[in-house]
Image (cartoon, rainbow, N blue to C red):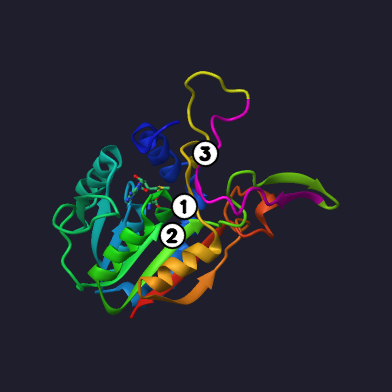
Amino acid sequence: MPTWDDAAQWYVDGVRGAGRGFNDLAARVTLDLLGGPDGVAGRRVLDLGCGEGHVARRLARLGARVVAVEPTAALLDAARAAERAEPLGIDYRTGGAEDLGPAGPGLADARLDAVCAVLVLHHVADLGAALGHVHRVLRPGGALVVVLPHPWTDHDGARWVPGPGGEQRAVGAYRREGYWSSGPAAGVTGPAPLTSVREIGWYHRTLGTWLTVLGRTGLVVHEVREPAGDDVPGADPRWADVPRLLALRAVRR
Ligand SMILES: C[S@@+](CC[C@H](N)C(=O)[O-])C[C@H]1O[C@@H](n2cnc3c(N)ncnc32)[C@H](O)[C@@H]1O
């Protein structure tokens, strides 16, 4: 199974190239849930699991004071290279979501106005620990924006099946929580370029689990969006009426 280190260059190429539409959709819903340009200007925002940094750069260009944390060295290198090419004042730090304290990126308590985790928290094994750290670094009233592949439409066994008006998304093993991966694309036997993050895999959790863990951590869900993929240039039209992402804003009590 490929790791994020194996996938780093593929991901950078995708986010900055042909795959950009999907990541752009995730970035746009994130910005909306953070309150748009007025909601981020001058605010202290953590981009958790920032990857190669496209969301962090978008926020910094709008005037946010951004700290960005990422565990995968090659992705962090790509983010720092982009910062050298276009200095935006983004404070990049090495770390994972499970520990944002002194043993990790060293973020102080209750300082931040907002945290965004864009297509990240489903890669984290210990969600309770990660959300506990998010709660700790947010000021009271600060917001967490989470964007995920929609758990109802993207999990082990979810697939396209023939339907009366074309292909439709069928639910698979939705109730089976835990790590899953699609394995290599059909017909591929040896090492091959990745075609999807599903080949790396992620921790599937039901909607009930996501909402329950957020609530138990003291993060109160204020808004939920379920964008389809149809407004993305080059999008697969089958996603037009199917939620592609689950995006929510939760506020620290
Ligand atoms: C799909 S990418 C999203 C990257 C970026 N947020 C974006 O929107 O382009 C998933 C990211 O999660 C990171 N990641 C994996 N495990 C993580 C963890 N335990 N804590 C924080 N980030 C993690 C990966 O290194 C990768 O950068």
Task: Mark 3: give few (<14), some (14-19) or many (20+) Cα within 10 Å.
Answer: some
In the picture of the structure, the residue carrying the numbered disc 3 is 181
- Is 68 a magenta residue? no
Q: Which mark is residue 27?
A: 2
| Amino acid type for the residue under numbered disc 3 | Ser
Report the side of 30 relative to 184 (left or right): left
Image location (x, y in percent) of residue 190: 51, 18
Within 10 Å of disc 1 (Cα), the crowding (few <14, some 14-19, many 20+) is: some
Q: Residue furthest right?
A: 164
Q: CA distance from mark 1 to mark 3?
A: 20 Å
- The reply to whether the magenta stretch includes residue 174 is yes
Question: How far apart are the alpha carbons under marks 2 and 3?
Answer: 24 Å
The magenta span reads 166-186
In the rendered view, tell whether residue 238 sits above or below residue 141.
above
SS for dot 1: helix
Q: Nearer the viewer, mark 1 or mark 3?
A: 3
Three-letter amino acid code at disc 2? Ala
Q: Residues within 10 Å of mark 2 (few under 14, many from 20)?
A: many
Q: Secondary structure at mark 3?
A: loop
Task: Tell me if residue 193 can be seen.
Answer: yes
Determine whether label 1 and label 3 are within 8 Å by CB.
Answer: no
Left or right: 113, with 23 as reference point: left
- Give the quadrant of residue 145: bottom left
Where in the figure is residue 170, as x and y percent of width and height?
71, 50
> Does ligand 1 reach within 8 Å of label 2's beta carbon?
yes
Residue labelled with disc 1: 23
| Position of the C terminus by quadrant | bottom left
